Image (tube, rainbow, N blue to C red):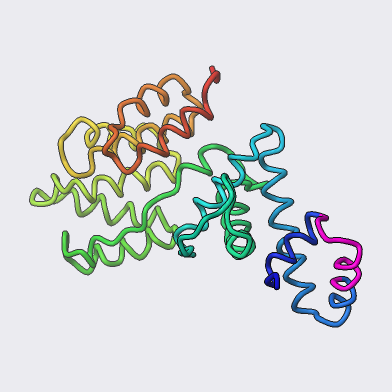
């Protein structure tokens, strides 16, 4: 007997026989849970298919779905058709993939490239013990709440102290505050110093130096900086995606 998810997929794909179709649609009238599952599957499939239809890449559709759902569902190893998930897991993954891809890939409301790629990391330096002091705890809270002016004021006071002037981590978050406040020259000064150094923040400095140029639509400078992000950096894949998106911009 075919399982519930296999029948749902066949129904949405128009693969049921006339007899099976009549029986299934009769069941839909009395089973609201089943109707909801059908609607979820239909919406997930339509969203995914629409995303790839202009490229005509059915393989990319299934590979994307498999990749996105992999961390959430572990499929039992068994023979399957080439380039296809098992029907059960296709449906289960569809729900997760639809939600994730709508947020991370489709983004029909997405704004500028800066809005997409210029996401700041959360500050956690007081928790990590890298720096201490009630004032930095206040700055950390202000930064994470988006109160960049307040955070920057505290960062500046902290860095003015002789013993703290070389604190790369606070220099980095100070640069982020300047970027958020559109003080581009100051942001570039902070990130350039980190980019030119050899600290653990070097690649982050390079990335946000590129993002500062991106915000100002300095396309060539952005490209030059993105190309300097090494393969071992956690920012490498983002850098490559952004390079593709700004290709041809002048």
Q: Is residue 44 above or below residue 32?
A: above
Question: Which stretch is magenta?
Answer: 14-24
Would you say residue 122 sits in the magenta stretch?
A: no
Q: x, y (%) of residue 113?
A: 54, 37
In this orientation, which residue lies closer to the viewer: 226 or 46?
Answer: 46
Residue 38 image-quadrant placement: bottom right
In what quadrant of the picture does the N terminus appear?
bottom right
In what quadrant of the picture does the C terminus appear?
top right
Quick check: 229 left or right of 64?
left
Q: Is residue 171 above or below residue 13?
A: above
Q: x, y (%) of residue 27?
A: 85, 78
Q: Main secondary structure of the magenta part?
A: helix
Outermost residue on the left side: it is: 163
Number of marks in the rendered image: 0
In this orientation, which residue lies closer to the viewer: 215 or 60?
Answer: 60
Residue 126 image-quadrant placement: bottom left
Residue at image location 43% in from the left, 58% down from the top: 147
Residue at image location 40% in from the left, 50% down from the top: 120
Residue at image location 74% in from the left, 58% down from the top: 43
Q: x, y (%) of residue 148?
A: 40, 54
In this orientation, which residue lies closer to the viewer: 150 or 68?
Answer: 68
Would you say residue 19 sits in the magenta stretch?
A: yes
Residue at image location 30% in from the left, 47% down from the top: 174
Q: x, y (%) of residue 211?
A: 42, 35
């Amino acid at each position: 007997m075919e399982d519930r998810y296999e029948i749902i997929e066949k129904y949405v794909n128009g693969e049921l026989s006339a007899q099976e179709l009549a029986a299934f649609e009769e069941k839909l009238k009395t089973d609201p849970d089943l109707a909801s599952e059908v609607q979820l599957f239909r919406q997930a499939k339509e969203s995914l298919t629409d995303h790839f239809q202009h490229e005509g890449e059915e393989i990319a559709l299934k590979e994307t779905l498999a990749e996105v759902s992999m961390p959430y569902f572990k499929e039992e190893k068994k023979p399957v058709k080439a380039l296809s998930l098992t029907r059960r897991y296709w449906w289960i993954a569809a729900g997760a993939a639809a939600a994730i891809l709508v947020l991370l890939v489709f983004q029909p409301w997405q704004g500028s490239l800066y809005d997409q790629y210029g996401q700041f990391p959360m500050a956690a330096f007081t928790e990590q013990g890298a720096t201490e002091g009630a004032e930095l705890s206040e700055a950390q809270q202000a930064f994470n709440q988006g109160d960049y002016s307040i955070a920057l004021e505290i960062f500046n006071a902290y860095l003015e102290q002789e013993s703290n002037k070389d604190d790369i981590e606070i220099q980095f978050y100070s640069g982020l505050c300047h970027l958020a406040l559109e003080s581009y020259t100051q942001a570039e000064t902070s990130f350039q110093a980190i980019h030119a150094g050899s600290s653990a923040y070097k690649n982050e400095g390079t990335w946000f130096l590129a993002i500062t140029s991106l915000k100002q639509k300095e396309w060539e400078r952005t490209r030059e900086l993105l190309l300097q992000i090494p393969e071992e950096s956690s920012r490498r894949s983002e850098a490559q995606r952004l390079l593709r998106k700004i290709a041809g911009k002048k």
